Amino acid sequence: MRAHLGDQLVVESPATGIARRDGEIVGLHHEDGTPPYDVRWSDTEQVSLVFPGPDAHLRHIGHGTPPSGHEASQASGAVSGAAPAFGAPEFAAPAAGDIGRRVAVERRRRGLSREETAGRARMSPDYLAHLEEHPADPTLATLVRLADALGTTVAVLRGRGADLPPGQGHALLHPHLRDLGPEACRALLSTHGVGRVAVTAPDGRPAVVPVNYEIVDDAIAFRTTPGSVPAAAVGTDVAFEVDHLDEALSQGWSVLAVGPARAVTDPDAARRLAGGAYGEPWAGGERELWVSIRPTRLTGRRITPGP
């Protein structure tokens, strides 16, 4: 008997051959996949160390051909009753195919092929293709391997908590907060993403608004509509903030840039910015005004587990 993480262990009645108990293999004690296994039983959600007897067999989930409907329902049942991490509220199950679409987006974002991703996640490329292209409900162990292969979290792949503010997990027991130098801040700003610009709105009130941004020649550039709240940045000193939180590990970073903002009025410069942009603004619509912020002060912080 050789198992993979995410496989189902089924214990049958010796007399009838009917499954009397099943669970998901969530831990291996030998690299070759031989027993014993840590099994999360679907009826109790409890994990126990199991030495399978002659009345037990494996259902291989997520390796080779896609699971059958019965196997998929067994896999789904082993996960759907699990309590959410960190005491967070429960959410509706993701729509059919949403997990596969998120996997595909994260894979393409990192420039990985299906073969590379499947190799990192220790699964068949055919199963990954099935997951990306068809409605599926992979086991928790499969999602853990995929999240690790893609450098993200299970929560991101599931899309849970999409309407909640980040940072609702537990704080680290021994957090380590350190300041980041300018070069580290520039690296984290990267080439593009979503950040927040703090301005004084046309009505005189302070406002913070999210914008899609690019980094061009060490300047932060974003496009907006004349007369909008982000356009109020032009001709003033503004603050621009970008951050990232890893909910699963309760750690992350933030970068704050402060400097003067100006409108990009040169038509050739504006065309170069539009031609080199990584994507369209999420807000949509015609946004022909490019605003450039050249930081005069760049600071950042990162929080990680302490020693």
Image (cartoon, rainbow, N blue to C red):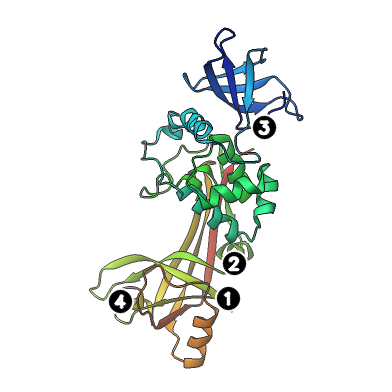
Q: Is residue 174 above or below residue 120?
A: above
Q: Which amino acid, mark 2?
A: Arg
Which of the two labelled residues, at mark 1 and mark 3, occupies the earlier sequence position?
Answer: 3
Question: Which residue is disc 3 drawn over?
Answer: 4
Which comes before the other along the chain, label 4 or label 2? 2
Marks 4 and 2, how far apart at CA: 27 Å
- Residue 187 seen from this side: yes
Please indicate whether residue 156 sits to the left or right of residue 38 in the image: left
Q: Circle 3 — which element?
A: loop
Alpha-carbon span between mark 4 and mark 1: 25 Å
Between circles 4 and 3, the one closer to the viewer is 3
Q: Are marks 4 and 2 in contact (CB under 8 Å)?
A: no
Q: How many residues crowd around disc 4 within 10 Å: few (fewer than 14), some, or many (20 or more)? A: few
Disc 2, SS:
helix
Image location (x, y in percent) of residue 111: 64, 61
Residue 237 versus residue 13 in the image, above or below: below
Can residue 152 be seen in the rendering of this structure?
Answer: no
The amino acid on which the numbered mark 4 sits, given as a three-letter code, is Ser
How many discs appear? 4
Task: Determine whether label 1 and label 2 are within 8 Å by CB.
Answer: yes
| Callout 4 secondary element | loop
Q: Pick out the residue farthest to the front.
A: 16
Mark 1, secondary structure of its residue: loop
Say what amino acid the circle numbered 1 marks: Asp
Name the disc covering residue 218, or none: 1
Q: Of marks 1 and 2, which one's residue comes earlier in the chain?
A: 2
Q: Residue beneath label 4, please? A: 228
Q: Are marks 4 and 1 in contact (CB under 8 Å)?
A: no
